[in-house]
């Protein structure tokens, strides 16, 4: 185990338009209140020395901190953005030679802060910690959370709240929006430099290909469809799928007003700012493709000198991946109800199930657990469908064993997350700790009822906020 970082900031080899040198604010009373032991181990950082290392590095004027510049379509409208409240401490390389951005979120103003204060509330930072780590344990690609710091100061949102910093770990923070920024540059080479850099860093296996830019696009399309199928599997609604919140590493990034569905509704949205349901549950795949098209636009001219040919090549990939998305989604849904092989009626069976779940407002997580446990027929309105499922299962190829890591028994339900965060604000950490422990093994059946039961009417959370 190391007592120091192993930083090597490759991102700083990019042209200056992609970042600014910044520094975390000098907070006087920093304290680590949550740390991720297994992630520290994975990064080869000594746990007992971590708090000192982190706080010292935040106050070390010799470190080359930086914030990243990017642009993005926010709810369809193009804007210039950047890390308004995040500073990159550095790119840490672990003993397996894997490179990770270590980023401080909520560490103070940067040149990209616009009118914001560059801070985060302790509650919203812990919210990201809980949910991103839950996603990781659900086997879904995501940025990780290494630690939470209390800044010791109060910041004003709708009232005064404690300030917090999240130490976030990512394969990279390059977004579709980073490419959109590059494409605005007068220097034509900026897009090319960003492409070459991204390929070398994230998809090195294609770096020697002559058609690597097209392959790069294909890789990202593939990683995005895999990701969205996974979100749909567990009922996750990201809430702000703006192009600046879509990482080209295929990691789920920027947990804002995200939420897990309780009762199933394909049009479900939680975010208070998503008035038209642009980022509603069933729109997520469509938006991913919209974002992919925005990415392709930034380097079309490098795919083929002939624009028409370039567009055709991109369209071909988008069409192919739309088809692949559907196949992957079907295969995931088959797994969820424990049927396998292909049967032409499966789609109807699955659609009928989802319609019933919608009409009868059934809980997304628990319904699939009931199907898995063959107790779904406890509801009279599910008896007919269950008979059809039993018939269909007779066609199963028994070689395939049940996929045990498909239907989570626990997800971070909104009402529990809120309850736990409100307790933390009062200085009570017991439920937070036990919630995090239970979320570590989401496919195990040993969960306390209070964490897995459906919320009653008063407990239901109907709206989530960016909560910056
Ligand atoms: P998000 O929707 O969280 O991805 O944020 C959108 C943009 O707003 C990003 O550029 C953030 O860096 C910026 N931002 C969010 N909160 C703050 C804040 N408190 N101060 C400054 N910038 C912020
Ligand atoms: Mg963002």
Image (tube, helix red, strand yellow):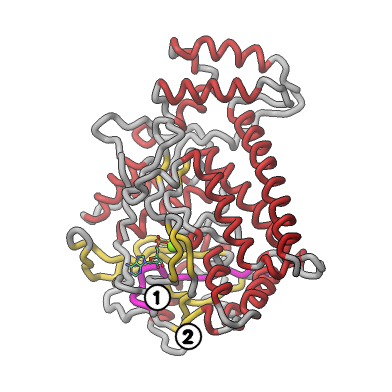
- Vertical placement of residue 353 versus 244, above or below: above
For the view shown, which residue lies furthest in the left direction?
159
The spot of residue 99 in percent (x, y) is: 61, 70
Residue range of the region highlighted in magenta in the rendering: 97-110
Q: Earlier in the sequence, mark 2 or mark 1?
A: 2
**Which of the four quarters of the rendered structure image does ligand 2 lie in?**
bottom left
Asked whether residue 48 is drawn in magenta, I would say no
384 relative to 77 in the view: left or right: right
Please identify the quarter of the rendering in which residue 160 is found.
bottom left
Identify the image quadrant of the N terminus. Answer: bottom right
Say which residue label 2 marks: 63
Residue under the image location 54 percent in, 74 percent down:
184
Residue 215 at least partly seen: no
Please identify the quarter of the rendering in which residue 97 is found.
bottom right
Q: Secondary structure at mark 2?
A: loop
The spot of residue 395 in percent (x, y) is: 72, 17
**Which numbered marker is on residue 112?**
1
Foreground mark, 2 or 1, reads 1
Asked whether residue 105 is drawn in magenta, I would say yes
């Amino acid at each position: 185990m190391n007592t120091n970082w192993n930083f090597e900031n490759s991102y700083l080899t990019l042209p200056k338009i992609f970042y600014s040198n910044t520094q975390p604010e000098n907070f006087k009373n920093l304290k680590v209140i949550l740390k991720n032991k297994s992630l520290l181990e994975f990064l080869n950082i000594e746990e007992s020395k971590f708090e000192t290392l982190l706080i010292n590095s935040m106050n070390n004027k010799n470190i080359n901190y930086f914030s990243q510049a990017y642009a993005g379509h926010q709810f369809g409208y193009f804007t210039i953005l950047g890390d308004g409240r995040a500073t990159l401490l550095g790119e840490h390389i672990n003993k397996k030679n894997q490179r990770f951005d270590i980023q401080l979120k909520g560490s103070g103003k940067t040149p990209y802060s616009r009118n914001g204060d560059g801070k985060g509330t302790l509650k919203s930072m812990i919210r990201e910690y809980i949910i991103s780590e839950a996603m990781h344990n659900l086997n879904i690609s995501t940025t990780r959370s290494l630690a939470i710091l209390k800044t010791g100061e109060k910041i004003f949102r709708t009232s005064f709240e404690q300030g917090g910093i999240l130490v976030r770990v990512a394969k990279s923070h390059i977004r579709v929006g980073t490419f959109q920024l590059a494409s605005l540059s007068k220097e034509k080479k900026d897009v090319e430099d960003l492409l070459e850099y991204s390929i070398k860093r994230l998809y090195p296996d294609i770096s020697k290909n002559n058609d690597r830019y097209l392959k790069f696009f294909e890789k990202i399309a593939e990683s995005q469809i895999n990701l969205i199928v996974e979100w749909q599997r567990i009922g996750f609604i990201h809430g702000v799928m703006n192009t600046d919140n879509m990482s080209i590493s295929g990691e789920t990034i920027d947990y804002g007003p995200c939420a897990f569905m309780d009762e199933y509704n394909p049009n479900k949205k939680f975010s208070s700012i998503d008035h038209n349901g642009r980022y509603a549950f069933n729109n997520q795949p469509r938006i991913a493709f919209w974002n992919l098209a925005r990415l392709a636009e930034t380097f079309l001219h490098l795919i083929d000198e002939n624009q028409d040919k370039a567009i055709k090549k991109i369209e071909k990939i988008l069409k192919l991946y739309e088809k692949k998305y559907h196949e992957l989604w079907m295969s995931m849904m088959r797994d969820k109800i424990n049927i396998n092989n292909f049967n032409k009626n499966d789609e109807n069976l699955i659609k009928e199930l989802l319609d019933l779940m919608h009409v009868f407002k059934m809980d997304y997580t628990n319904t699939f657990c009931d199907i898995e446990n063959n107790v779904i027929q406890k509801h009279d309105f599910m008896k007919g469908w269950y008979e059809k499922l039993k018939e269909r299962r007779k066609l199963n190829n028994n070689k395939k064993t049940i996929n045990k890591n498909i239907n989570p028994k626990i997800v971070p339900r909104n009402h529990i997350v809120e309850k736990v965060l409100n307790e933390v604000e009062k200085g009570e950490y017991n439920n937070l700790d036990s919630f995090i422990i239970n979320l570590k093994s989401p496919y195990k059946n040993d969960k306390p009822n209070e964490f897995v039961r459906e919320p009653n009417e008063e407990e239901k959370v109907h709206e989530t906020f960016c909560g910056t």
